[in-house]
Every structure is written in structure tokens, then in C-alpha cells.
């Protein structure tokens, strides 16, 4: 293997030399981003400057012309209303109408004065000020004439003639001047709006041109980054992917670059040479690993089979052993008054329990070479009374658990069917034993059974700890137990055994529960075994 990678020209290239100055990729990227940042700042400053120009023109329209037009509109409305209120005051005959009209005149007079004051606070040109002063003088003259007419003595006809003569003339002069001032203001506001529109269009065009310039500069910068940085990095990444895929025939095109990309390319070249040397060793290791994995998988499978078999056997022996132990304890306690018939009955119960252990052992030993112990379980069907078998199960548990209250509601007539007595006895016993175990110190169990057509339905109901809703669909799986049963001993095999046995009988089992309120297990068996 060469000490240094070879360039495309065939000459050795240096590796590990740090790049500095303008040859550095870091320097070029820093320069490019600095120029881009400076360009963004210039674009921002120029845009703010143009927007400020537009805002200044808009401020003139907003603060001067729109305000002037609004105030002049108010003046036109107030003066017209004042003239109408004056006419109402002259023509009114009732004292309350005259009082109301003069109150309106006073209010309108104050509104006109307020509007004039507001107009005086707005900056105006010389022509506007001249018209406004003329209006102010004429309005004062009209006000004086109107006050004289409304306060004149004599009949109503005299005041009406005065209202239609001098008062009308004074109001007409003031109204004409105010109208001329309004038209002048509207014309100047329109001109200012046109100027603002021109300023806005110019600013928009300049900002668009600036943005186009910025986009062009950005495109040039991106093109430079793509051709000088991105594309070489993409080529280098492709070469590394080839090496990762064990393809050592990789061509490296940037070995002579004096920057960081060149350094990475030279490092990849060394890695490529090392990969070629390691490829043969890896092939040998892979073959050895495959052989070891095969041995390990066989050992793992054998260990799992052994664990399943031991768990199943130990669980299924527990109930018969409990029966044997219970009968033996009763014989010891009652040894003084026990009769020969009692001894015979209890010895018969012990013998039946031993026979069940023997039967389960034979079936499990026959299945010990299968994937799980229950897959090849031997099932021996015989004609029997399913009701009687269930009663025997309940009797057994009453004897083995005297503290448990087991209430049964079964049919009186026999329910004949075909089943494996030993396996079905053990399956039903597992469910009853679970109900007792998970019901606390004083179990209360109810068992109901009845025939529905060609099915025999058994319900085993307890008031124990129940099953969590998230566990209800998994409790019949191997080694699965409810989360709320962690403090109670168990292996998670019993209900799996129940499901397997009932499956061999073409039956089924299901569970319903509310956690903390008990559980109901429903067993369904065909009365006649399916073909």
C-alpha cells in the first residue's frame, strides 16, 4: 500500500497540510457571505430611503390636505345648518320653538368656531389664507346682521323681509367664499395625490430594480458556490457512498486542490487504499460470523423450547398438586374421626389428581420437540357429560380453596359432547383458579353454564382486580400478564394453555373486564366435535 495517495497525473500528493489564506475554503465562503450581507444591507438602506420619501409625501396629504378638506366640509355643513336654524327662529311663533331654535343657533355657532380654530392650526398657502380671511370677515358680518334681524322689534313680516334682504346677502357672500376655498383646497389635494402617486411609482420601480440586481448577484453567488464547492462535495460524497458499498474502484478528481476539499479527497484516497486491504479480511470474518450465528441461533431455539416446556409443565402441575395437598391436610386434621368411606373418597380424589398429572405430563412430553409445547398436543376425544365435568372442576376447587365462595348455576340435564376430559378439565380449572387467585382474601366466584343450540356456553365471573383495557387483547398470549398483576405470582402460561386446548376442541375463550371491578371469562364449546 503506498504511503501517499496518487493524483490523477500519477504524482504523489501531500496530505495533512493545512490550507491558509485565499486558498482556504473557509476564507472564500466568508468572503462570499460578507459580500452577500453587505448587499442585503445596501438594499435595505436604499429601500428604507425610498419608502421614507413616499411616507413624507403621504404625510403631507394625510396631515394637511385630508384634514383641510374634512374641516372645510364641516364648515359648509355647520354654516348651512346655521342659516336654516336662523330661518326657523324667525318663522317660529310658539315660545318653546323659538327657544329651541336659538339653542340650536348657539350650538352651531360654537361648532363653527371650533372648526375655524381647527382650520387655523393647519399649515396653508398664501392663496388659501387670503380666501379664509375673506370668509372669516364675511361670516362675522353675516353673524352681526343675523343677530340684528333676530333681535329686531316689530311683526314677523318685518323680520322675514330683513332675513331675505341684508341677512341673505351677507350669508351668500360668506358661502360663496367658503365654496371657493373648498374648491381650491380640493384641487390642491388632488395635485398632491398625483404627486404622491408619481413618487410611489418611482420608488417602486427603483426598489424593483434593486431587488432584480440583488437576485442577479445572489444567482451569481449560488452558481459560484455550486461549481466550486457544492459539486466537488457531491462528487466526494458519491465516492464515499461507493466505498461504503464496498466498491473500491473509485475515481477521485480533486486530489490536487489546495483547500479543505482537497484535504478530504486525499483522506478518502487513503481510506480507499485501506478498504482494499481490509476487504479480504472482512470476507473471511463474515464467513466465520455466519457459522457462529448459525450455532447461536440453534442454541437460542433450544433454550426457548426448554423454557416453554418447563413453564407449561410447572403451571399445569400446580392445580392437581394443590388438590393432593388439600386432601392430605384434611386427612391429617380429621384423623381422629375420619371414616373408611371418607378415606376412600379422599384417596380417590388424590388418585384422580395424580392421573391428571400423568395425563398432562404425557401430552407435554409428546409436544416437547415442537416449536411450542402445545403445538403437537395429543388430544383424545371421548363422549362425556360437559355439565358433570364442570361440576367436578368446581368441586375440586371448593375442596382446595375452602375460603372461596363458588356459586354455580348449571343446567340439570346432562349436556353430552365429545372432548378430552383431562385437557378440558385442566383448562377450565385454570380459569377458575385464576379467578380465585386474583379475587383477594375472600373470593366470590359465580359460574353459569347453559346450552345454546349446538354450543355449550360457560361464564366464569369474579369480582377481583380485573384486567386493564390495554391488556385485555393480549392476556391469552404466551407469557403475557396484566400490568396490575405484577405483585401476584404467575408465569403467563395458564390462559395460553386454555386458548390452545379450546382451539383443539374447535371452541374459543374470551374475556371482558373493568379494571378494579372483576372479570368475566366466556368459554364456548361445540356440543358435537366438528370434523
Image: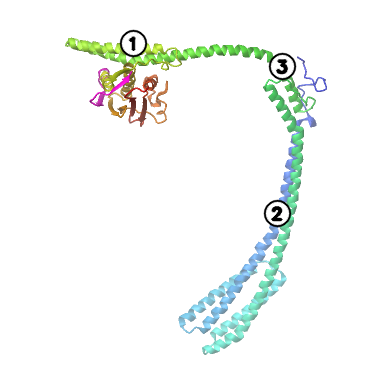
The first of marks 1 and 2 along the sequence is 2
Residue closest to the eye, 524 or 176: 524
Q: How many marks?
A: 3
Q: Quadrant of residue 459?
A: top left
Q: Which residues are magenta?
A: 398-419
Residue for badge 1: 358
Cα distance, mark 3 to mark 1? 64 Å
* Residue 141 appears in the picture as rendered: no
**Where residue 405 sits: x, y (%)?**
25, 24
The N terminus: image quadrant: top right
Q: Is residue 399 magenta?
A: yes
Q: Quadrant of residue 84?
A: bottom right
Marks 1 and 2, Cα distance to the nearest angstrom?
Answer: 99 Å
Q: Is residue 152 left or right of residue 94?
A: right
Q: Write down the quadrant of residue 224 in the picture.
A: top right
Camera-side mark, 3 or 1: 1
Q: Quick one: label 2 or label 3, which is nearer the N terminus?
A: 2
Identify the element where label 1 is drawn. helix
Q: Write the residue at 72% across / 52% down.
A: 49
Secondary structure beneath disc 2? helix
Q: Earlier in the sequence, mark 3 or mark 1?
A: 3
Query: How far apart in space, not on screen, are marks 2 and 3 (Cα)?
Result: 65 Å
Residue to which mark 3 is pinned: 276
Give percent across and percent down for residue 508.
37, 25
Residue 144, visible in the rendered structure: yes
- Mark 3 is surrounded, within 10 Å at the Cα level, by few (under 14), some (14 to 19) or many (20 or more) other residues, namely some
Q: What colouring method underlies this structural image?
A: rainbow
Image position of 454 (left or right of 265): left
Mark 2 or 3, closer to the camera: 3
Is 85 magenta? The answer is no
Residue identified by numbered label 2: 51
Amino acid at each position: 500500500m503506498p504511503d501517499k495517495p496518487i493524483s490523477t497525473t500519477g504524482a504523489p500528493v501531500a496530505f495533512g497540510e493545512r490550507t491558509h489564506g485565499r486558498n482556504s475554503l473557509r476564507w472564500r465562503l466568508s468572503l462570499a457571505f460578507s459580500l452577500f450581507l453587505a448587499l442585503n444591507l445596501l438594499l435595505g438602506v436604499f429601500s428604507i430611503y425610498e419608502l421614507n420619501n413616499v411616507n413624507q409625501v403621504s404625510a403631507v396629504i394625510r396631515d394637511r390636505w385630508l384634514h383641510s378638506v374634512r374641516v372645510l366640509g364641516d364648515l359648509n355643513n355647520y354654516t348651512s345648518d346655521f342659516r336654516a336654524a336662523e330661518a326657523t327662529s324667525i318663522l317660529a311663533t310658539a315660545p318653546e320653538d323659538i327657544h329651541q331654535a336659538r339653542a340650536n343657533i348657539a350650538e352651531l355657532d360654537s361648532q363653527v368656531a371650533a372648526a375655524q380654530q381647527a382650520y387655523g392650526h393647519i399649515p396653508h398657502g398664501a392663496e388659501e389664507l387670503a380666501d379664509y380671511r375673506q370668509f372669516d370677515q364675511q361670516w362675522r358680518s353675516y353673524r352681526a346682521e343675523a343677530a340684528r334681524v333676530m333681535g329686531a322689534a316689530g311683526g314677523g313680516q318685518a323680520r322675514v323681509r330683513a332675513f331675505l334682504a341684508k341677512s341673505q346677502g351677507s350669508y351668500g357672500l360668506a358661502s360663496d367664499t367658503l365654496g371657493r376655498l373648498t374648491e381650491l383646497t380640493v384641487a390642491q389635494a388632488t395635485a398632491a395625490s398625483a404627486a404622491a402617486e408619481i413618487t410611489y411609482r418611482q420608488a417602486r420601480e427603483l426598489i424593483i430594480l434593486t431587488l432584480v440586481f440583488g437576485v442577479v448577484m445572489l444567482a451569481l453567488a449560488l452558481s459560484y458556490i455550486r461549481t466550486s464547492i457544492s459539486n466537488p462535495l457531491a462528487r466526494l460524497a458519491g465516492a464515499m457512498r461507493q466505498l461504503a458499498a464496498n466498491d473500491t474502484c473509485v475515481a477521485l478528481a480533486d486530489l490536487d486542490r489546495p483547500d479543505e476539499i482537497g484535504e478530504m479527497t486525499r483522506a478518502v484516497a487513503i481510506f480507499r487504499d485501506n478498504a482494499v486491504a481490509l476487504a479480504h479480511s472482512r470476507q473471511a470474518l463474515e464467513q466465520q460470523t455466519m457459522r457462529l450465528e448459525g450455532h447461536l441461533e440453534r442454541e437460542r431455539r433450544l433454550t426457548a423450547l426448554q423454557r416453554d416446556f418447563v413453564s407449561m409443565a410447572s403451571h399445569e402441575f400446580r392445580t392437581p398438586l394443590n388438590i393432593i395437598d388439600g386432601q392430605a391436610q384434611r386427612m391429617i386434621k380429621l384423623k381422629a374421626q375420619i371414616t373408611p368411606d371418607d378415606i376412600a373418597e379422599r384417596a380417590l380424589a388424590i388418585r384422580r389428581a395424580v392421573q391428571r398429572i400423568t395425563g398432562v405430563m404425557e401430552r407435554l412430553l409428546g409436544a416437547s420437540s415442537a416449536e411450542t409445547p402445545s403445538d403437537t398436543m395429543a388430544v383424545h376425544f371421548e363422549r362425556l357429560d360437559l355439565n358433570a365435568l364442570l361440576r367436578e372442576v368446581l368441586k375440586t376447587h371448593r375442596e382446595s380453596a375452602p375460603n372461596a365462595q363458588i356459586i354455580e348455576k348449571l343446567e340439570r340435564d346432562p349436556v353430552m359432547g365429545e372432548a378430552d376430559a383431562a385437557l378440558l378439565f385442566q383448562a377450565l380449572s385454570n380459569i377458575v383458579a385464576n379467578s380465585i387467585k386474583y379475587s383477594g382474601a375472600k373470593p366470590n366466584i359465580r359460574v353459569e353454564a347453559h346450552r345454546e343450540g349446538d354450543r355449550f356456553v360457560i361464564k366464569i365471573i369474579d369480582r377481583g382486580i380485573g384486567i386493564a383495557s390495554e391488556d385485555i387483547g393480549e392476556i391469552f398470549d404466551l407469557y403475557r400478564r396484566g400490568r396490575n398483576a405484577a405483585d401476584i405470582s404467575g408465569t403467563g402460561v395458564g390462559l395460553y394453555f386454555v386458548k390452545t386446548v379450546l382451539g383443539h376442541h374447535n371452541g374459543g375463550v374470551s374475556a371482558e373486564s373493568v379494571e378494579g371491578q372483576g372479570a368475566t371469562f366466556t368459554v364456548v364449546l361445540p356440543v358435537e366435535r366438528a370434523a
